[in-house]
Image (cartoon, rainbow, N blue to C red):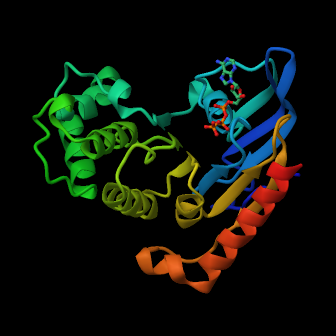
Amino acid sequence: MTRPPQASGGRTWPAITIRGLCKSFGPAPLYRDFDLDIPRNKIIAVFGPNGCGKSTLINMIAGLMPYERGEILFDGKTLKDTKVGYVFQNYRDALFPWKRAIDNIRYPLALAGMARAEIAARVDRIVAAFDVRFDLARYPYELSGGQQQLVSIMRALVPEPEVLFLDEPFSALDYEMTLFIREKLQQVFMETGTTMVLVSHDLEEAVFLADIVLLLTKRPTQIAEIIDFTVPRPRTVATLSTPAFVATKAHTLDVFQREVRK
Ligand SMILES: Nc1ncnc2c1ncn2[C@@H]1O[C@H](COP(=O)(O)OP(=O)(O)OP(=O)(O)O)[C@@H](O)[C@H]1O
């Protein structure tokens, strides 16, 4: 089951097209002839049973993990012609410890050979968007976990990727920091429309952020259901108690439990 391409700006193809994807670890297949269309300018939350291959899926799409067969295209282009960003669950390993926070954020732009003035302007914009209140001249080890994850999200977004992948970005953060980063991420999404693919273990978080919840089955992994959550943004803490949110969460949980029991 795949979602039909979304129309956007007169264009009708999806942001990411996956066809016939095959991936195994050892003899048992994880993905076998897996097809999926991911629409542009949406937040897609990937949710499913433990070990069903959520991280593997985004890692294959983002080019961090090889696959045996199949095709993944971005607007018809291959990954090498596409700008993507990635936020890791483990921000401690993701940041360069020898670089100050601000230099971590500048790094991808400097690597791309961007002019100093343009780097400064881009960094200023992203720092303002995330409402950063701590000292970015500090090194990662001098920052809290939430602050480090914020730095790594800013570093992923500053090159203005076409697609941002996030692998459980909040799982190591406290609830207050999770709420803060969630809100900022949503704000940036509303301003830029960057397609985001988010792996989440937390059903509330997945539904809250998502336009679409991609619910996966146990392995060999298929799509259990694609669930739309169309409540307008900005979503706030009050959204969590709306009938639409509660109903979507309950439905997602139902399908999830059915899949886990199979
Ligand atoms: N490098 C690897 N070598 C061998 N097996 C692997 C490797 N990476 C993942 N796997 C296996 O593939 C399956 C899918 O792993 P993956 O981490 O993608 O699942 P997940 O749905 O993100 O898991 P979780 O819910 O536990 O975060 C698991 O059974 C895992 O053990």
Quarter of the rendered image showing ligand 1? top right
Compared across the picture, whether 159 is left or right of 209 comes to left
Q: Which residue is painted at 40% across and 43% down in the image? A: 172
In depth, the one of 81 and 236 nearer the eye is 236
Residue 64 in the image: above or below residue 208: above
Where residue 262 appears, as percent x and y from the top left, is 89, 49
Where residue 158 appears, as percent x and y from the top left, is 34, 41
Where residue 252 appears, as percent x and y from the top left, is 72, 64
Residue furthest to the bottom: 243
Compared across the picture, whether 214 is left or right of 169 comes to right
Q: Which residue is painted at 89% across and 52% down in the image? A: 1
Give the image quarter of residue 222.
top right
In depth, the one of 143 and 133 nearer the eye is 143
Residue 111 in the image: above or below residue 18: above
Give the image quarter of residue 44.
bottom right
Is residue 114 visible from the viewing direction of this image?
Answer: no
Give the image quarter of residue 70.
top right
Q: How many marks?
A: 0
Is residue 249 visible from the viewing direction of this image?
Answer: yes
Q: Which residue is painted at 83% across and 36% down in the image? A: 219
Where residue 242 appears, as percent x and y from the top left, is 56, 84
Compared across the picture, whether 109 is left or right of 186 comes to left
Residue furthest to the top: 26
Residue 210 in the image: above or below residue 93: below
Compared across the picture, whether 216 is left or right of 212 comes to right
Residue 26 in the image: above or below residue 160: above
Q: Which residue is painted at 74% across and 38% down in the image? A: 52
Residue furthest to the front: 261
